[in-house]
Amino acid sequence: KAGVTQTPRYLIKTRGQQVTLSCSPISGHRSVSWYQQTPGQGLQFLFEYFSETQRNKGNFPGRFSGRQFSNSRSEMNVSTLELGDSALYLCASSLVGVSTDTQYFGPGTRLTVL
Amino acid sequence: AQSVTQLGSHVSVSEGALVLLRCNYSSSVPPYLFWYVQYPNQGLQLLLKYTSAATLVKGINGFEAEFKKSETSFHLTKPSAHMSDAAEYFCAVSVKGGGSNYKLTFGKGTLLTVNP
């Protein structure tokens, strides 16, 4: 079974631009969660989508948004990029969501903001 | 709110030595606990999880962890380190929030170095 895929793997943007990251979950998984990983703050939860609905949200500004499509694929968008948005963005999929369910992580998208 | 503290951002052991990575959590409700491993330029992979069944949990690659409620700890151990164990390890707690949804909170991570 194919794992979680994320595209693109690497991205370089400049301040003020916007970016869209994509995540394809494991087949049959309906939950997709997004995390930001930085050396200073570690892994921080952004949001979780389940059956096209945002089910939970972390403490990030409104510039960070996401959506999920009917095939469970998810996109994350960051508008008006800031230098501090440089990070590894990880998505994780699971059958029913965050609880006791195992989260399967993708390899991440490394975003660099110049 | 729940939180996770990993004691020691960097642990170094010799090949064949005991690996002990420490994790303490705070939660007002019974938590579910996880250990994940991250190899360079890769995502996270689940090592093991505690979901209120047996307090001693066995995972992949010879790792195990013991849930101790009285100490609010979930330390990760492996009797004999292998060079391939060198990676970053994350402890995480999943707790139901104000609504009916769970949230996964990670510790800052512990980088394990294995010396030959």
Image (spheres, helix red, strand yellow):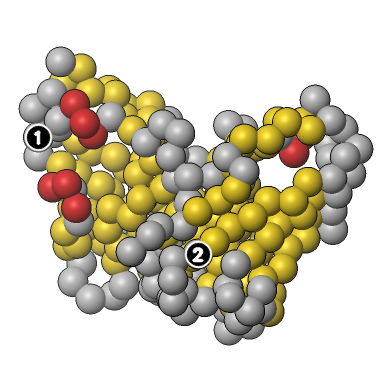
- Residue A18, quarter of the rendered image: top right
Point out the residue furthest to the top here: B116
Frontmost residue, B22 versus A72: A72
The percent position of residue A69, horizontal first and vertical second, equals 66, 74
> Is A61 rendered above or below residue B81?
below
Q: Position of residue B59 (x, y in %)?
A: 20, 56
Identify residue for label 2: A25
Q: Can residue B25 be seen?
A: no
The kind of residue on which mark 1 rests is: Ser
Which residue lies at the image location 56% right of the left edge and 67% below the top edge?
A32
Residue occupying the point 19% across, 26% down:
B83
Front position in the image: A3 or A37: A3
Task: Check the residue under mark 1 and report the chain it is in.
Answer: B
* Disc 2 versus disc 1: nearer the observer: 2
Q: Residues within 10 Å of mark 2 (few under 14, many from 20)?
A: many
Tag of residue B39: none
Vertical placement of B15 versus A56: above or below?
above
Tag 2 near tag 1, CB within 8 Å: no
Neighbor class of circle 1 (other Cα within 10 Å; few <14, some 14-19, many 20+) is some
The amino acid type found where label 2 is placed reads Pro
The chain ID associated with circle 2 is A
State the image coordinates of residue A31 (x, y, percent, origin top left).
Answer: 53, 73
Residue A16's place in the image compared with B69, above or below, is above
| Residue behind mark 1 | B80
Label 1 SS: loop
Is residue A40 visible to the viewer in this orientation of the structure?
yes
Q: Residue at (15%, 42%) from the top-left corner?
A: B78
Image quarter of residue B52? bottom left
